[in-house]
Amino acid sequence: MANDALEEQPDNIWNKRAAAWVHYSYLKKFSQPDTYDIFTEYLQKIKELALPEDEKTVFDNCAWQIGSMVFGLQKPIHPDYRKVNELFSIIREFHFTKPSKGYSFLYKAFHKGYQGWGAYLDFADWWGFDNFKPEDYLKEEYNGKKTMSMVEKAYIGYSKKLLEGDPLDTFGHQRAINTEKIHAFLPQLDSVIGKHPDYQYPPYFKAKLLLAVGDADHVLSAFLPFARQKRNDFWVWDLMAEIFAGDKDKQFACYCKALSLKTPEDFLVKLRQVFASILVKRQMYDEAKTEIQTIITTREKQGWKLPPSLKELTEQEWYKTATAKESNHKLYSEHLKVAEEELYKDIPEEIVVVEFVNKNKRILNFVKNKKEFGFFNYSDFLNRPQIGDILRVRLKGKGQQGFFTALTAKKAEADLECEAIKHFNGTLEVISPVNFGFVDDVYLEPKIIQSSNLTSEQTLTGKAVLSFNKKKNEWGWKAIEVG
């Protein structure tokens, strides 16, 4: 009946609508992969009706059936992407409501198999990332666990395909990065990073894209916020090494940091081989052999073949005479601080003074001025700090009762200007019988007076540190050196 009415009056909108809904009923019936040909036949019929743009209802209903079909087509291990391409080519002219739940479902379906789909970028551009609904930006829940939002998955997928590049030959063995497309996408990526700092991975892919287009000036600042969040993952430092390709010492340090972390060995074989090649160039043959033997052990355990490049290294003369170590952990420890320093380089250093040291707990009290002071654990940064040492530090948030987390800490030049240190010169007054003393407003502890055999009326010069007197609830100066 619908066909007869349409044949009599092909331009009548009511006849077109009637036919569209009949075709839709067949779509719904045949929306499974085993009836793909019939499904596509009726989808094509809807397209050929050339419904006007304001006829969105039928298209919105079709979105759910198309999405179901696409999900079904991608269930096999090797999906038939020719069918996915065909569906995409048909629906390009459909007039969906944007944004809408059906339209978002459509995106989710086509995104499912993006890694193997060559037309994914074309689809994403057609769909339009400005058409996500507010709920698409929220984390999803699957089997009781929170997973990343659909939007974050979309930006990651798009970034990965950009990095994959466009095929230059039939088999896709040679590929070229589309720098124009990357530059067009980066502002969108910046926007989602700025609006959703809780998304962890977009900054990582921004760094990868900047590297791909050779924008070395901005890649580090883009990557650091992400790197700090994921600093205990080896692949973060692998990318840091790539960022510092022009600075061999920093690159070396990044590889050391990556290999120092607790990571399953089967994840590290490629990284170890790169590092082994660097060690060979540095003529650190014992260390290189250590890395190579670790790789060989891991590959044999996993039943993996040795790549020709690795075999080539084992056949060289240096390998035959080198002595492998038990591990290279000492080497890593000697260099990784350089890499860790880079992680926080965009955070300004502060100049502080050590005011007290608890060697047993490896905690030190510091003071910058009367408003900024506290304490932190120094075990990862300093060896035997002393009262009066001037430090360059980067600290993270004041915690309970003045506790800070140290991001970086190192000794500064002893003559560096600092608010919490002053030099004094004057006459000593010793207070008996408690045997402490003062030079003007500088307090000298009894042990300083006793150890140096000081007496009243002596002229002293020295150095004092700003210190808080808890008993008097006031700030003062405490001598740390006299001469």
Image (cartoon, grey):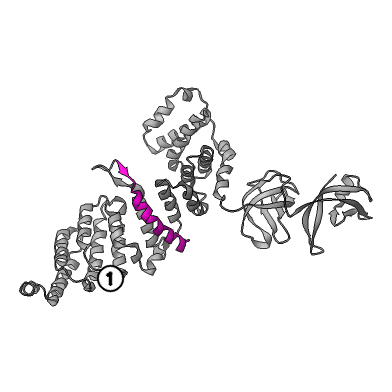
Vertical comparison of 463 with 65: above or below? above
Vertical comparison of 319 with 214: above or below? above
The x, y position of residue 88, in whole percent, is 23, 59
The x, y position of residue 13, in whole percent, is 14, 76
Instruction: Answer with the quarter of the image where residue 66 lies.
Output: bottom left
Residue corresponding to mark 1: 97
> Magenta stretch: residue 436 in it?
no
The x, y position of residue 242, in whole percent, is 46, 43
Q: Is residue 80 in sight in this rendering?
A: no
Vertical comparison of 207 with 253: above or below? below
Per the picture, the main secondary structure of the magenta-coloured stretch is: helix
Q: What residue is shown at x 58% (from left), y 37% (from top)?
A: 330
Q: Nearer the viewer, residue 400 or 236?
A: 236
Q: Is residue 399 left or right of residue 83?
A: right
Q: Nearer the viewer, residue 51 or 294?
A: 51
Judged from the image, the secondary structure of the residue bearing numbered disc 1 is loop
Amino acid at the residue labelled 1: Thr
Give the residues in magenta: 174-197
